[in-house]
């Protein structure tokens, strides 16, 4: 018998953009390992590789990608042809090089894209977007469309400065923007705290915003070893220090996943597609 519960439309997915000011700080590793961990916990996770420059989430997962969203837009493939199962059971939309030409999409392609993306929203608990680095329009559009923004940095002064630059840009473009900061490649938790406090201080003083501390991931040789093996470290080395910290972050995110949010990602994404 059908109940009210069955008739209620599923809640749209929450969307998390993983981004950074400086390149090479660990976004893809964080995004892929979070996706793998949350999927192992039974969550329905979609990872969208939105790094239009160097898409490589598929490489980290040892997946052989032949088709991307570009093929869907041109009508040569369906969405299910393009999506592939990642380690742990998440779904990957590989290297969306088709989006690079988003400004040139025809009306037909735009409508098709919208349609496809809106369908996806109901099928997942969390959509994780691995963006490129920096403040290009492509990165910022994804960041603006997300419910949550995770800014990844390392303790290096250049990475910290660029993280602040990115946060400043986000705050200028979107009033009341909320973001969390994850410090990757730290030597110990004291260093992580010191880096977070430094960024939080300038954010409060000069931008009038507070950052949320998403925690840290230690500098861990298991990470680069897993990259070489093309396997997420949470799966290949579940007991290594980095895996422990990613698990903590996954639990934090999972707790927030049930909170209400305004509108869905794809509705906002739709607005820039239409613009
Ligand atoms: N916690 C860590 N411990 C040790 N090495 C790490 C750690 N995080 C990242 N690395 C190393 O840094 C490299 C770059 O990481 P990754 O590709 O995830 O960065 P990115 O921010 O996605 O880069 P890009 O800006 O090019 O997309 C990895 O291949 C890995 O060798
Ligand atoms: Mg990357």
Image (cartoon, rainbow, N blue to C red):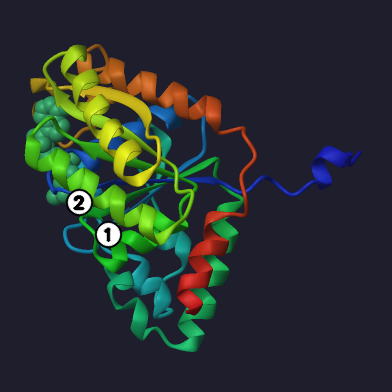
In which quarter of the view is residue 204 placed?
top left
As drawn, the label of residue 95 is 1
Q: Say if mark 2 contacts mark 1, CB within 8 Å.
A: yes
In the rendered image, the vertical position of residue 200 relative to residue 13, given as above or below: above
Residue 224: quadrant of the picture: top left
Observer able to see residue 228: no
Answer few, some or many: residues within 10 Å of disc 1's Cα (few below 14, many 20 plus, some between 14 and 19). many
Does residue 263 appear anywhere in the picture? yes
Residues 46 and 275: in front is: 275
**Mark 2 vs ligand 2: CB below 8 Å:** yes
Outermost residue toward the right in this view = 1
Residue 210 vertical position relative to residue 83 in the rendered view, above or below: above
The percent position of residue 139, horizontal first and vertical second, equals 30, 60
Q: Position of residue 105 (x, y in %)?
A: 39, 83
Mark before the other along the chain sequence, 2 or 1? 2
Residue annotated with mark 2: 56
Residue closest to the eye, 17 or 35: 17
């Amino acid at each position: 018998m059908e109940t009210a519960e069955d008739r209620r439309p599923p809640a749209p997915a929450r969307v998390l953009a993983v981004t950074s000011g400086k390149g090479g700080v660990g976004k893809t590793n964080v995004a892929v390992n979070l996706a793998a961990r949350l999927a192992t916990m039974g969550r329905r996770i979609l990872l969208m590789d939105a790094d239009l420059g160097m898409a490589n989430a598929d490489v980290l997962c040892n997946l052989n990608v032949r088709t991307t969203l570009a093929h869907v837009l041109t009508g040569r493939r369906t969405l299910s042809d393009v999506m592939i199962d990642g380690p742990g059971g998440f779904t990957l939309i590989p290297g969306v090089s088709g989006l690079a030409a988003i400004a040139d999409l025809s009306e037909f392609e735009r409508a098709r894209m919208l349609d496809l993306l809106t369908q996806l929203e109901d099928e997942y608990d969390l959509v994780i977007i691995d963006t490129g680095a920096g403040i290009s329009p492509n990165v910022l559009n994804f960041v603006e469309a997300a419910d949550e923004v995770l800014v990844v940095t390392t303790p290096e002064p250049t990475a910290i400065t660029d993280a602040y630059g990115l946060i400043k840009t986000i705050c200028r473009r979107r009033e009341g923007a909320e973001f969390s900061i994850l410090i990757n490649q730290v030597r110990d938790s004291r260093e992580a705290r010191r880096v977070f406090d430094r960024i939080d201080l300038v954010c409060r003083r000069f931008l009038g915003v507070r950052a949320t501390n998403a925690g840290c991931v230690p500098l861990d040789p298991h990470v680069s070893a897993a990259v070489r093996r093309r396997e997420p470290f949470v799966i290949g080395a579940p007991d290594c220090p980095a895996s422990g910290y990613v698990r903590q972050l996954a639990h934090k995110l999972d707790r927030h996943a049930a909170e209400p949010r305004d509108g869905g990602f794809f509705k906002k994404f739709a607005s820039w597609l239409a613009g």
